[in-house]
Each structure stands twice: as structure tokens, then as C-alpha cells.
Image (cartoon, helix red, strand yellow):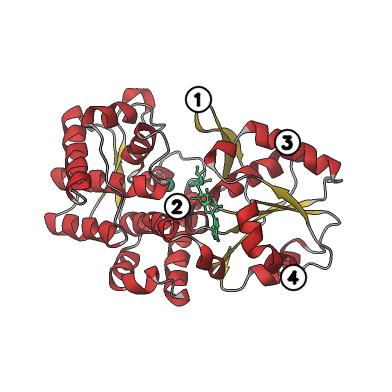
Amino acid sequence: MIAGSGLVETLAPRIERVVGKLPRRIFVLTSAPIWALWGHCLQQSFAEAPVVLLLPPGEKYKTMASIDRLLREVVMAGGDRGSLLIAFGGGIVGDVGGFLAAIYMRGIPYIQVPTTLLAQVDSSVGGKTGVNLPEGKNLVGSFNHPRAVFADIRVLGTLPDRELKAGLMESVKAGIIRDRSLVRFMEQHVDDVLRRDEKALEKVIVASIRMKAGVVNLDEREGGLRMILNLGHTVGHALEQATGYKTLLHGEAVGWGMVAALHLARQRGTISTHQFERLESLVHLYGPLPPLKLRTAKVIAATGGDKKNIGGVRRFVLPIGIGDAGIVEDVTAAELEAAVNYMLARAGEKHA
Ligand SMILES: NC(=O)c1ccc[n+]([C@@H]2O[C@H](COP(=O)([O-])OP(=O)(O)OC[C@H]3O[C@@H](n4cnc5c(N)ncnc54)[C@H](O)[C@@H]3O)[C@@H](O)[C@H]2O)c1
Ligand SMILES: [Zn+2]
């Protein structure tokens, strides 16, 4: 995993350092808008232009149908067992590319070049790849680690502000659950980070990646520790589902989900009121999060389908102080309701 500035334009020699001599066929999976912005830059260091595979942007193309089509395109373009795939895009391209590489001829090597903040700090780390089914998100996939990840801070320069802020919610999460100094840094450098100062962004990205990689190393298959990465995600996923995956970006939903989790933690006393105020402020410093117009009952109903509720137990990740987190399995309906009520009140009042 390398994070830095200007990696895309020097990609070929960097990949060579990892895999040895470059294979005859190199494929780049990307989407048209990203390729239009950064394709020339990526091609620059390759003696022979890679074969470009396009995935239209949007969650609705993260499907088996896309995988089927792309697999056949790779065959037609002469892909063999020695071919290399580069996933060049956001989390969707990364998840689809990783899965494609896992199953093409039972597996070919691949490289992640994430171009959104979310993909750099979260989805390109940890080896989870896959696609959605009409019945639910990420229901098909495999664990497949890339040979290398190159997170180029410069490509974030064209990322829409809203995407940047949404990705930063995962960094806020990283700090809360595992890295007190990241929390402090993000509190003190809001302006630098939001105006994309490269040094400030690099610091946030490197710390976030280090946190996730550390947790995943200890628990790749989510037996226990890896679950703390889901802080804010029980309610966050419920919000995404309750809004039909249309109005909220994932990071925004997680931002509101963290507000609910922080409330629950304060009620249980795993964080103090002072810590609660500090952490909730941190979430809003990287906002504003979009307003929500939802009923509490609808959000609570949507938490029922969360993957973390094994056998109906309401599992919840709660912060313990700042920089630590734990999993509780006995969250009552009343506690959840109070947390969701608090969050929805905040989400209504801010923009009323
Ligand atoms: N595998 C994992 O562990 C993991 C973890 C978290 C999320 N995910 C998945 O990641 C996906 C979301 O990823 P995302 O937030 O990166 O969204 P995304 O891939 O949809 O990218 C967001 C948008 O930004 C555009 N874009 C990307 N890079 C750009 C750039 N440099 N400049 C301008 N525009 C750019 C894309 O075309 C897209 O429209 C979801 O499918 C989610 O399930 C996976
Ligand atoms: Zn997330």
C-alpha cells in the first residue's frame, strides 16, 4: 500500500517493482468520467497502452451482469492467466475489479488504484470484493487481496466536494474507534483537509489506511475485531435502505449513524458527555450532513436486515472513550429508539 502524490503518472514502473516484468496483456477497469479526467495520465508510463474496460458509473452497474460482460470482454481481448488487471476508480470499480480478477480463469493478479477518498481509506483495504444482487448489496463476492494499492492524492483534486466529505466520514470513524491522534489532527486541520492540502490529506489517508489494515490483519474474516469497523453502519445502512439508496452517499449515512451510536454510547456511559460533544462536533465539522425526513419506526425496521444482527441480536459498535470501541449485543429496542430519535431530531433541526 503506497499513498502519495503523482503515483498514477508513474504507475508502470511502480507495478513492475511489485510484480516483476509487466505481462503482455494489462487491463484497466475504470469508468468513462474517470478515464476522461485521468486516463492520459495513467497511460503515460506504459510503453504499450493497456486495454481499457469500462464500467458505467453508479451502484446499479455493480452487478453479475456487468461481471459477465466484462469477463467476456477480457477473453475477447486475449486475457490469459498471466494478465494483470488494474482497478482504476472509486469503490464500485474496485469491488467489481477485485471480483473479476478473483474469478477470471480462477484468478489473475490485480492492482488497486483508488480514485475516491472512500476507496483510498476504506474499500481498497481489506480484500473484500464483490457485487450486488437485486435482493441486497454486496451479497456475492470473494476475499481477494490486490498485489498492491496505490492511493494517489492528486487524483482527489477532481473529486466532487460532497464525495470528499462523505469519504472523510470513514476517516472520522477510523479515529474514533482506533486512533485518538487522528481525531485530534482532524479537529485541528479541518480547513486544510477540506481545501485538499496534500500534506493534510496524506496524513488523514495514511492514518485511516493504517487503522483499517491493522484491524483486518488481526481479523480478516470478521470473526470479532473487524466488526468495530462498522461503527455508525448499523443505523447508516438502515438510512441508506430507508431512503432507497438514492439521497444519501454511504459516508453521509455513516455520519448520521455515528451520531446515533454516539448517543447510545453516552447513554451507556462508554463515553462521557464531554467526549460525546467533541465527537459529534467532529462529525459536523466535516459536514453538513444532508437533512433527513424519516420516521423513527422506518429506520428501526430497516436495522433489522443488517448483516451484523446475527439471530435477531441487536449488535452495535460503540465507542469506548476516544480511540477505542467495542461490540455490544444487548441493545434494547428502547435504547435504539432513543438513539434514532436523537439523530433524526438533529437531522431535522440543522436544516429546518
Ligand atoms: N470492499 C470494501 O471493503 C468496501 C468498503 C466500503 C465501501 N465499499 C463499496 O464502495 C462503493 C462506493 O465507493 P465510492 O464511494 O468510491 O463510490 P463510487 O465508486 O461510485 O465513486 C463515486 C463517484 O465519484 C466518481 N469519481 C471517482 N473518482 C473520481 C475522481 N478522482 N474525480 C472525479 N470523480 C471521480 C465516480 O465516477 C462516481 O461517480 C460501494 O459500492 C460500496 O459497497 C466497499
Ligand atoms: Zn462504510
Which of the 4 quarters of the picture holds residue 238?
Answer: top left
Which of the 4 quarters of the picture holds residue 1?
Answer: bottom right
* Residue to which mark 4 is pinned: 44
Q: Residue at x 73, y 48 (%)?
A: 53
Mark 3 secondary-structure assignment:
helix
For the residue marked with disc 4, what is the amino acid?
Answer: Gln
Label 4 close to label 3 by CB (< 8 Å): no
**Mark 1 Cα within 10 Å, few/some/many (few <14, many 20+)?**
few
> Which mark is first along the chain, 3 or 4?
4
Report the side of 341 relative to 51 (left or right).
left
Q: Which mark is residue 135?
A: 1
Report the side of 93 relative to 342 (left or right).
right
- Residue 129 location in percent, x, y? 59, 42
**Mark 3 Cα within 10 Å, few/some/many (few <14, many 20+)?**
few
Q: Can you say whether 130 is above or below 17 in the image?
A: above
* Residue to which mark 3 is pinned: 69
Q: Residue at x 82, y 45 (%)?
A: 81
Q: Nearer the viewer, mark 2 or mark 3?
A: 3
How many angstroms separate mark 2 from mark 3 (CA)?
A: 35 Å
User: Between residues 336 and 217, which one lies in front from this camera angle?
Assistant: 336
For the residue marked with disc 3, what is the amino acid?
Answer: Arg
Mark 4 secondary-structure assignment:
loop
Q: Can you say whether 345 is above or below 39 in the image?
A: above
Report the side of 97 relative to 23 (left or right).
left
User: Between residues 67 and 210, which one lies in front from this camera angle?
Assistant: 67
How many angstroms separate mark 1 from mark 4 (CA)?
A: 41 Å
* Residue to which mark 2 is pinned: 215
